[in-house]
Image (spheres, coloured by chain):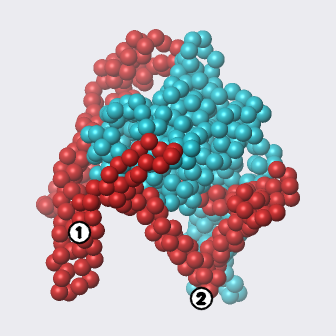
Chain colours: A red, B cyan
């Protein structure tokens, strides 16, 4: 049987190479060896080569080359488009960016870089508010409960939409406490980042210190989620080794389907 | 050596605090490997209680109609497959069962598209091999691949103002293998503006969400599927209403798979049987638990090992402090 892409033997060889590379990269946990260096450089080379190819096939060919030279109808396609040669002007414009390496002509690189900065800055004005505006708005929360008849919001399970809406429009005592904790946290953390004046009063100093403590709590939560992510990535590699390669891959190679 | 016992040997406290890291790596390797194999051989499931943000994401996606078009913005490669891979598989299974068409693209890294195509092929193979074989999801008829955009911010800005301008130059292969503009495909032929797309699903291992919400929020529902490390940052977008659903890494994937299996009944109860149309129906009898649940037992065991290691280190510290006093 030929070693084609669909051949189970080819698939198994490919996965075996993946397993060897996985353990090669993990060998760094023991110490940095030549084996690790070999796989590290192989990975970088493959990623760089693949990215270069994909930038042509996925981007430049579709978005620059084809509009420039045009696309001619063939037997299976009804689409026809003449070339737009002004697209060729993009090549010298983009090439100017590389003049940054020339001491004499590096001024030319400022033209394409300036264009890119202009586009980015133009978008940034509007988008900053779109990004943070709703979050700032959401940080303004009511504190005084509107319904004192019970401590927490009642369950909405099995209620009609009108009743659910009525419950959601009320603020209950426990929600008020939650909002108060949020507000205190917000103010304390913001006060920690006020650097233009020195806090001398005990209250303001206390707020700043509390802000630092609360930030630490936040960083702890972020660190916890980071650990969870790292574990998930390790589990995935082990799944690839034990299940996909050793159990399923071997099974398929032996004709198990 | 002041910290050592009188006989020159390290104390118990000192030994507990200085366990060789290679021993810890070996413990992790053994615990994870054995729990993965056990979960695979005996199909062990671990219960999960879906969070509100996962339920909202499921509800939005489950209530799409056959023929609706959604965007799947893939921004991950195999390096984060442990979390994003399960999310991608779950979304694709759901879209294919609901006969929802989708547009696939990335602006994070060119490799993302190849990884996503591999997942689509795998789900298609799964559908072919199912007890009741289901039709293959075909490129061009059921989904189109727009490929890689080098400047996502500008592309999304153009999408917001004129989607046909933004993607007009993109082509995909039709059923005959000929390349044609994507707006001639059944997936996009009726799409005139961004509001015609029913949902934007971002599956990401990097910080792409600020770019998306700043340009497309409130124009269509945005659902973010991320790695756990990004959850604290993106939860703000969810709480402020900029995101309509949020899936938190591996834990979120397991919750999403649980919802696919149990659904949300008319009273909002996961797996309930209340009378009336459910808020989000399940997919009974189908393969709902997959990569997320496959990893979950190993994940729980690894977290337990971590807690044990922290406890051991702290016990060692207290013993040592007491001895020093």
The residue under label 2 is B1
Residue beneath the point at 40% across and 60% down: A61
Chain of the residue where label 1 is placed in the rendered structure: A
- Check the picture and name the quadrant holding the N terminus of chain B: bottom right
Q: Nearer the viewer, residue B139 or B43?
A: B139
- Local secondary structure at mark 2: loop
Residue beneath the point at 64% across and 17% down: B273
- The 10 Å Cα crowd at callout 2, few under 14, some 14 to 19, many 20 or more, is few
Single out the residue that lies furthest toward the left. Answer: A197
**Left/right of residue A202 with respect to residue B119 in the rendered view:** left
Q: Position of residue B27 (x, y in %)?
A: 71, 66
The residue under label 1 is A93
Residue beneath the point at 75% across and 31% down: B132
Q: Position of residue B214 (x, y in %)?
A: 29, 44
Point out which mark residue B133 bears. none
Quarter occupied by residue B24 = bottom right
Single out the residue that lies furthest toward the front. Answer: A75
**Can you tell which of label 1 and label 2 is closer to the viewer?**
1
């Amino acid at each position: 049987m030929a070693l084609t892409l669909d051949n189970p033997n080819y698939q198994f060889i490919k996965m075996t190479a993946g397993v060897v590379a996985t353990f090669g990269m993990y060998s760094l946990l023991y110490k940095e060896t030549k084996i690790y260096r070999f796989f590290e450089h192989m990975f970088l080379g493959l990623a760089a080569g693949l990215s270069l190819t994909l930038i042509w096939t996925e981007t430049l060919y579709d978005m620059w080359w084809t509009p420039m030279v045009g696309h001619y109808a063939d037997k299976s396609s009804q689409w026809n488009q003449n070339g737009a040669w002004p697209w060729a002007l993009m090549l010298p414009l983009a090439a100017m960016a590389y003049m940054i390496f020339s001491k004499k002509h590096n001024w030319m690189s400022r033209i394409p870089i300036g264009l890119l900065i202009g586009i980015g800055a133009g978008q940034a004005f509007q988008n900053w508010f779109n990004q943070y505006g709703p979050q700032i708005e959401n940080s303004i929360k009511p504190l005084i409960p509107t319904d004192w008849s019970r401590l927490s919001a009642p369950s909405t399970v099995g209620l009609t939409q009108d009743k659910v809406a009525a419950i959601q429009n009320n603020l209950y005592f426990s929600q008020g406490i939650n909002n108060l904790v949020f507000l205190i946290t917000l103010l304390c953390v913001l006060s920690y980042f006020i650097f233009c004046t020195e806090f001398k009063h005990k209250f303001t100093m206390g707020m700043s210190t509390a802000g630092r403590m609360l930030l630490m709590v936040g960083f702890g939560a972020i660190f916890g989620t980071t650990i969870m992510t790292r574990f998930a990535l390790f589990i995935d590699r082990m799944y690839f080794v034990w299940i996909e390669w050793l159990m399923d891959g071997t099974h398929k190679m032996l004709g198990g389907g | 050596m002041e910290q050592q016992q009188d006989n020159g040997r390290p104390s118990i406290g000192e030994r507990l605090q200085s366990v060789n890291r290679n021993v810890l790596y070996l413990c992790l390797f053994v615990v994870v490997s054995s729990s993965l194999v056990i979960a695979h051989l005996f199909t062990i499931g671990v219960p999960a209680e879906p969070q509100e943000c996962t339920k909202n994401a499921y509800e939005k996606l489950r209530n799409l109609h056959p023929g609706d078009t959604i965007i799947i913005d893939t921004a991950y490669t195999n390096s984060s497959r442990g979390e994003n891979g399960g999310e991608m598989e779950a979304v694709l299974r759901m879209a294919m069962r609901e006969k929802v068409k989708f547009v696939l693209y990335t602006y994070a890294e060119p490799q993302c598209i190849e990884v996503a195509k591999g997942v689509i092929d795998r789900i298609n193979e799964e559908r072919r091999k199912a007890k009741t074989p289901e039709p293959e999801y075909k490129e061009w008829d059921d989904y189109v691949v727009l490929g890689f955009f080098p400047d996502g911010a500008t592309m999304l800005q153009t999408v917001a103002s004129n989607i046909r301008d933004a993607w007009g130059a993109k082509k995909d292969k039709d059923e005959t293998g000929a390349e044609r503009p994507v707006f001639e495909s059944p997936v996009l032929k009726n799409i005139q503006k961004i509001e015609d797309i029913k949902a934007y699903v971002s599956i990401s291992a990097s910080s792409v969400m600020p770019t998306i919400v700043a340009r497309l929020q409130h124009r269509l529902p945005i659902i973010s599927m991320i790695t756990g490390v990004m959850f604290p940052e993106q939860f703000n977008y969810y709480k402020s209403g900029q995101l309509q659903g949020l899936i938190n890494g591996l834990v979120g994937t397991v919750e999403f798979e649980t919802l696919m299996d149990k659904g949300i009944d008319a009273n909002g109860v996961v797996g309930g049987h209340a009378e009336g149309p459910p808020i989000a129906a399940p997919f009974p009898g189908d393969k709902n638990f997959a990569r997320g649940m496959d990893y979950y037992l190993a994940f729980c065991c690894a977290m337990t090992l971590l807690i044990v290691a922290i406890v051991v280190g702290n016990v060692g510290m207290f013993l040592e402090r007491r001895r020093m006093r």
